[in-house]
Amino acid sequence: MKNLIVVVAFLGIWSIRFYAQDMFEARQLTFESAQQGFPTWSPDGKFIIYQHTDYNDTIGKNGLWKVSQDGTGARQIFKGVAEHPKWSPDNRYIVFDADTGKSIKMMPFEGGPPINFLPDSIHIINGGLPCWSPDASKIAFLEGSTVSLCIYNTKTGTIKRIFHKEGFLPLPGCWFPDGKNVLLALMDRESRKSTIWKISADGKEKKQIHGHHENFYRHLAISPDGSLLIYAAMEEGYLGLHIMSSEGGPSLPLTFTPQLHNEGIDWAPDGNRIAFSRGKFGSSDILIMDLDIEKIKEKLKVPNK
């Protein structure tokens, strides 16, 4: 029976690799019949934390899991419904969407009781997509009642609303490495089509980044040097990943898998690898792809920073 399971697992992996159109080889990190998603790298690049979601979970596996970048030593660090985790750059906390998207909490990176840090006046609806600034002093998130992009200051406990557009969802993706701007997907609430925007942390400057697909969806990630941007776009009804200059322009297809979504990207701190999830609703796994940055920049005509 054990040998049969191994054979079936191997064939499943082989079939995914056979059909996946990857620019570079991607290796699978998790192997579960559940939804593994939204990986986030540790600041030293040695570990990944990801969410585990099984709608039929009866043994308490739902929550956040930590695994080595080689796929060994997986262990649960939080039990319960947890989504969109982000590891703080100072290696102290994990911030995440909790309570089925009705709150944002943080916890020590090794595990421990979750901390409620937002005041009751702030409402989170269907997830706030929290993300840390590079110095870990701020958290950008989506506030639900006003549908605004907000920034929480971890030192002062103050909150500032910096962006709102009627009829649109400002979905935070990440901060730029300089800590001065937030990258977001601005989604039309009716058509569900999105555009990419760069919003200054004080909300005074707004710049649209052009060049992505018309069917861009969301899932944004900026390279550690700030030169490259990865995004997810719908193709044949499924999400594929593309890469472009962070200033806009043409893009390259990074990975596409027929009948499977590729999403939830996070760059490794060294800038040479990404982690992402591949699968479909209810069943997906974490993968790591090593990138040839020089080759990508040469094709996109992006100068080194």
Image (tube, rainbow, N blue to C red):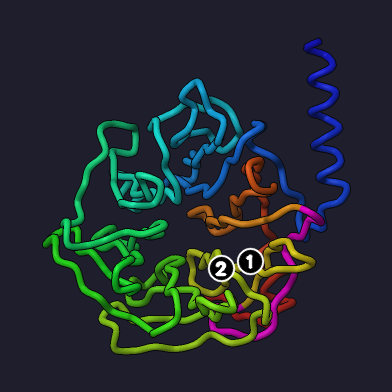
Q: Residue at x 83, y 14 (%)?
A: 3
Q: Are marks 1 and 2 in contact (CB under 8 Å)?
A: yes
Few, some or many C-alpha atoms within 10 Å of disc 2 (few <14, some 14-19, many ≥20)? many
Q: Nearer the viewer, residue 89 or 287?
A: 287
Q: Could you tell whether 142 is left or right of 269 in the image? A: left
Instruction: Check the image and report above or below for 126 versus 64.
Output: below
Q: Residue at x 59, y 40 (%)?
A: 35
Q: Is residue 8 magenta?
A: no
Few, some or many C-alpha atoms within 10 Å of disc 1 (few <14, some 14-19, many ≥20)? many
Q: Is residue 252 magenta?
A: yes
Which residue lies under the disc numbered 1?
232
Q: CA distance from mark 1 to mark 2?
A: 6 Å
- Choose top left, top right, bottom left or bottom right for residue 146: bottom left
Instruction: Check the image and report above or below for 74 versus 107.
Output: above
Q: Among all residues in the image, which is located at the extreme top?
A: 1
Disc 1 secondary structure class: strand
Disc 2 secondary structure class: strand
Q: Which residues are magenta?
A: 245-259
Question: Amino acid type of disc 2?
Answer: Arg
Q: Assign the N terminus to one quadrant of the image.
A: top right
Instruction: Check the image and report above or below for 270 versus 236.
Output: above
Q: Among all residues in the image, which is located at the extreme front?
A: 190
Q: Residue at x 62, y 49 (%)?
A: 277
Residue 218 numbered tag: 2
